[in-house]
């Protein structure tokens, strides 16, 4: 897939650097707790904690790289020119195993773009090259 | 006159618990105007958004029986929904002589542009209210209610330039696009994903949308201001088979689930209830206005968030107007992607429709002649993309001037809004200020 290369900024750079090193990082506010007393994680990363609004407790936490397919649609007419030659393609929403409230995207490489996309199926992260720069992005592949 | 500023965020009614709107029934809509429509701009200045916005504004004034000298405020949704005229240098699109020497007047129309070119010399208040015309409409209601101006034109020109709509070229992407563009996630996949979730949860399918789309087109066939009525009436006669056979855009969304980008301009005229008594048209009173700015927990709007956003909008509409769901006669939520209109129908509980029941409701009698005249405007699916047809129709229905579209049920109150459950603005209107 002809993925555009993300251009990191000051806030997002640790996440994208993590992708280049094969690590899936998510922003964590050490001063807050989420549901059930677990870590307060947020993605996409932001300048301040989405919950408490402060910046001083923001850190990065590595995820285990597993998740499941939360849902999907199948794109036939994307406005992203670099993706148009690969139409139709899946755009899946991935729910992280470590943090189900966090959602990321995937083309589900290796999965046919039809109505049999396995919602609920387990996925494993991998890191793919992109078109414009050396920046890698997180992708997800069905593992069962 | 000072430079135009953004309408202050603090003056939109975004939260629950605000009580009945302090200006309920004290502000009225007294004029409507809409220019001709076209699929794309033909490049002549006579059909530019600037020219057409002036045309629409004059129509609104004529309806009320007042002149440009009576106007003391203008609020514009100053950017259109299409691409810029001069944005793509490779296409060699040069600007024209003033007043068409910038994007203003070509791909959108600002309040200042209208004031200057229409000669509105008594205007003392102008604002930008970006997003949809709906955003500018609710701003006008609040501004008139607050006494900041007494007679306010609300305008938007929205266009469609030659060439494909909203293409994203290049091999790199920064800003918010860094999180979505590599995968092609944008509004359309979000809506298609949401509809997929809906069907999975409630056991529905895309075929069940057909009665709604056909009814939207049918209502469009009775809307003389609309694009299809004026330009492509045959497209209003589609069958369920035609609907379902159209090509996929993002499955399960097909081309007939999308509103058609068009070139047109609209204007609404607001004034005080007191001044409205002396104007030509029967006033339609503003009973409340509501703004929704939902915040997603992560990268997408989940189905749970969409359902809560929709219900939250409804609760705010009802609270501030004092109406209940059973007291709303006309209901015109946005349908620009038809696959999200069910969220509004169910969130508002209009005609008793509950969660997971909208597609079954569509299979009933939703004709304007029938007992459940849902989306009597025909919406943007039946008239082309403006995001204001719902407001336009609601005003006409409450006046009793909707022509062949006039509903046969009681038409004393109405709710209309655009655009999505997460980001939208709403008007609650009535024939009585009380």
Image (cartoon, coloured by chain):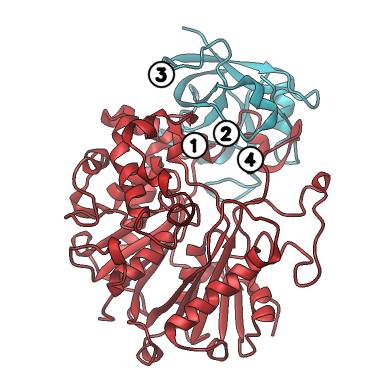
Chain colours: A cyan, B red
Q: Quadrant of residue B116?
A: bottom right
Is residue A48 positioned above or below B23 on the image?
A: above
What numbered label is drawn on residue A120?
3
Mark 2 or 1, nearer chain start: 2
Q: Nearer the viewer, mark 1 or mark 4?
A: 1
User: Do the residues under discs 2 and 1 have CB atoms within 8 angstroms?
Assistant: yes
Are tags 4 and 3 found on a single chain?
Answer: yes
User: Do the residues under discs 4 and 3 have CB atoms within 8 angstroms?
Assistant: no
| Residue appearing at x 53%, y 63% in the figure | B36
Q: Which residue is mark 1?
A: B190
- Viewer-side residue, B368 vs B209: B368
Q: Nearer the viewer, mark 4 or mark 3?
A: 3
Distance of label 2 from label 4 (alpha carbons): 27 Å
User: Do the residues under discs 2 and 3 have CB atoms within 8 angstroms?
Assistant: no
How many C-alpha atoms fall within 10 Å of the one at disc 1: few (<14), some, or many (≥20)? Answer: some
Q: What chain does badge 1 belong to?
A: B
**Residue B388 image point, x, y percent:** 46, 61
Element class at badge 3:
loop
Q: Which residue is mark 4?
A: A58
**Residue B26 image point, x, y percent:** 36, 83
What numbered label is drawn on residue B185?
2
Residue at the farthest top position: A144
**Residue A99 image point, x, y percent:** 49, 28
Q: What chain does badge 2 belong to?
A: B
User: Do the residues under discs 1 and 4 have CB atoms within 8 angstroms?
Assistant: no
């Amino acid at each position: 897939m002809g993925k555009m290369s993300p251009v990191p900024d000051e806030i997002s750079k640790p996440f994208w650097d993590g992708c280049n090193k094969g690590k899936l990082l998510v922003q964590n506010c050490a001063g807050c707790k989420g549901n059930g007393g677990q870590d307060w994680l947020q993605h996409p990363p932001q300048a301040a904690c989405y919950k408490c609004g402060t910046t001083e407790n923001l850190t990065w936490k590595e995820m285990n790289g597993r998740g499941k397919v939360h849902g999907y649609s199948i794109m036939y007419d994307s406005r992203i020119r670099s993706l148009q030659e690969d139409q139709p393609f899946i755009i899946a929403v991935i729910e992280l195993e470590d943090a189900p409230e966090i959602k990321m995207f995937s083309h589900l490489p290796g999965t046919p773009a039809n109505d049999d996309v396995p919602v609920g199926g387990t996925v494993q992260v991998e890191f793919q090259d992109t078109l414009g720069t050396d920046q890698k992005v997180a992708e997800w592949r069905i593992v069962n | 006159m000072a430079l135009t500023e953004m309408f202050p965020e603090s003056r939109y009614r975004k939260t629950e618990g605000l009580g009945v709107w302090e200006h309920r029934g004290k502000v009225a809509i007294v004029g409507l105007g809409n220019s001709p429509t076209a699929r794309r701009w033909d490049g002549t200045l006579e059909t530019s958004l600037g020219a057409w916005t002036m045309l629409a504004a004059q129509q609104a004034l004529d309806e009320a029986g007042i002149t440009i000298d009576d106007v003391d405020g203008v609020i514009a949704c100053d950017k259109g929904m299409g691409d810029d005229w001069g944005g793509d240098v490779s296409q060699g699109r040069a600007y024209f002589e003033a007043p068409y020497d910038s994007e203003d007047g070509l791909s959108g129309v600002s309040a200042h542009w209208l004031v200057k070119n229409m000669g509105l010399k008594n205007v003392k208040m102008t604002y930008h209210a970006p997003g949809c015309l709906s955003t500018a409409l609710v701003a006008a209601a609040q501004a008139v209610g607050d006494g900041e101006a007494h007679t306010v034109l609300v305008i938007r020109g929205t266009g469609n330039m030659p060439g494909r709509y909203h293409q994203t070229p290049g091999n790199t992407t920064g800003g918010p696009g860094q999180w979505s563009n590599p995968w092609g996630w944008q509004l359309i996949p979000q809506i298609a994903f949401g509809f997929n979730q809906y069907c999975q949860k409630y056991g529905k399918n895309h075929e069940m949308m057909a009665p709604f789309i056909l009814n939207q087109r049918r209502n469009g066939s009775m809307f003389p201001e609309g694009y299809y009525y004026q330009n492509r009436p045959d497209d209003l006669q589609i069958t369920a088979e035609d609907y379902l056979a159209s090509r996929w855009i993002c499955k399960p969304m097909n081309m007939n689930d999308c509103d058609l980008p068009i070139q047109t301009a609209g204007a609404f005229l607001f004034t005080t209830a007191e001044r409205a008594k002396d104007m030509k048209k029967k006033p339609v009173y503003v009973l409340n206005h509501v703004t929704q700015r939902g915040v997603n927990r992560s990268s997408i709007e989940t189905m749970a968030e969409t359902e809560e956003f929709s219900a939250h909008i409804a609760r705010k509409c009802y609270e501030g107007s004092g109406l209940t769901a059973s007291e709303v006669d006309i209901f015109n939520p946005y349908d620009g992607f038809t696959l999200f209109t069910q969220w509004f129908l169910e969130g508002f509980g209009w005609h008793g429709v509950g969660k997971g029941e909208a597609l079954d409701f569509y299979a009933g009698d939703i004709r304007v002649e029938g007992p459940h005249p849902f989306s009597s405007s025909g919406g943007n699916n039946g008239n082309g993309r403006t995001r204001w047809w719902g407001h336009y129709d609601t005003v006409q229905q409450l006046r009793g001037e909707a022509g062949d579209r006039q509903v046969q049920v009681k038409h004393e109150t109405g709710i209309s809004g655009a655009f999505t459950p997460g980001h939208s603005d709403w008007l609650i209107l009535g024939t009585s200020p009380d």
